[in-house]
Image (cartoon, rainbow, N blue to C red):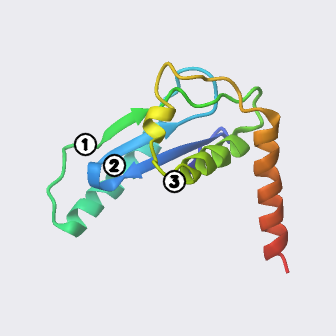
Amino acid sequence: MVAESKSRHWVLLIVRAKRETVYFLDPLPGNRVVDEEGKNIMNSALKIYNSHIGRPGRKAPIWKTLPGTPKQPSSVECGYYVMRFLRDIIMDPSLEFEKKFAKGKEQAPYPQAAIDEVRKEWAEFVCLHME
C-alpha cells in the first residue's frame, strides 16, 4: 500500500497478512512513524482479513519501521523513491526487503540513474495507456 499523508508525503506500507505484520518504509530522513489514522486503517483491514479466514489473530498487528531505506535528498522526490522501493522489492526474487532495508544498512540517496530509470518506466507506462 502506498500512502500519502496530509502533508503530501508518500510512504510505503507492506502488509504480510498471514504474519499480521506491517512494514513502514519512508524515504524522508529521520525517525518518522506512521500516523494514527494510517495505523488504524491497516489494523482494521487485518482484523477483517482474520475474520474472513476464521482466525482469531493477535490483539494488534506487529508494526516494523525499516529505517535502512535510501533517503531522498530534498522534499520533492518521495513519489519516485516509493516507486523505486516497490521496483527493488518486486525485482528481488528472494523478497528479503526486511533485511535489505534493516537498521544500520546504507541510507544514502538512490543514484540519479536509479530515479531516472523509474521516471522513464513510469512515463512509458502512462504514454502506452493514454491511447
Residue 126 location, quadrant: bottom right
Secondary structure found at label 2: helix
Identify which residue, 126 or 112, lies in the foreground: 112
* Disc 1 from disc 3: Cα separation: 19 Å
Residue 75 location, quadrant: top right
20 to 75, vertically: above or below: below
82 to 33, vertically: above or below: below
Residue 90 in the image: x percent, y percent?
A: 55, 53
Left or right relative to 46: residue 106: right
Secondary structure found at label 1: loop
Residue identified by numbered label 1: 60
Residue 88 in the image: x percent, y percent?
A: 60, 46
Q: Are marks 2 and 1 in contact (CB under 8 Å)?
A: yes
Left or right relative to 63: residue 6: right
Foreground mark, 1 or 3, reads: 3
Residue type, numbered disc 2: Asn
* Disc 3 from disc 2: Cα separation: 13 Å
Mark toward the start of the polypeptide (2 vs 1): 2
Residue 11 in the image: x percent, y percent?
A: 58, 41
Residue identified by numbered label 2: 43
For the C terminus, the image quarter is bottom right
Residue at the (53%, 27%) spot, across then down: 68
Residue 22 in the image: x percent, y percent?
A: 39, 44
Foreground mark, 3 or 2, reads: 3
Q: Are marks 1 and 3 in contact (CB under 8 Å)?
A: no
Left or right relative to 68: residue 110: right
Residue identified by numbered label 3: 1
Residue type, numbered disc 1: Ala
Q: Which mark is residue 4?
A: none
Residue at the (75%, 50%) spot, across then down: 118
Residue at the (85%, 69%) spot, across then down: 127
Q: Residue furthest bottom?
A: 131
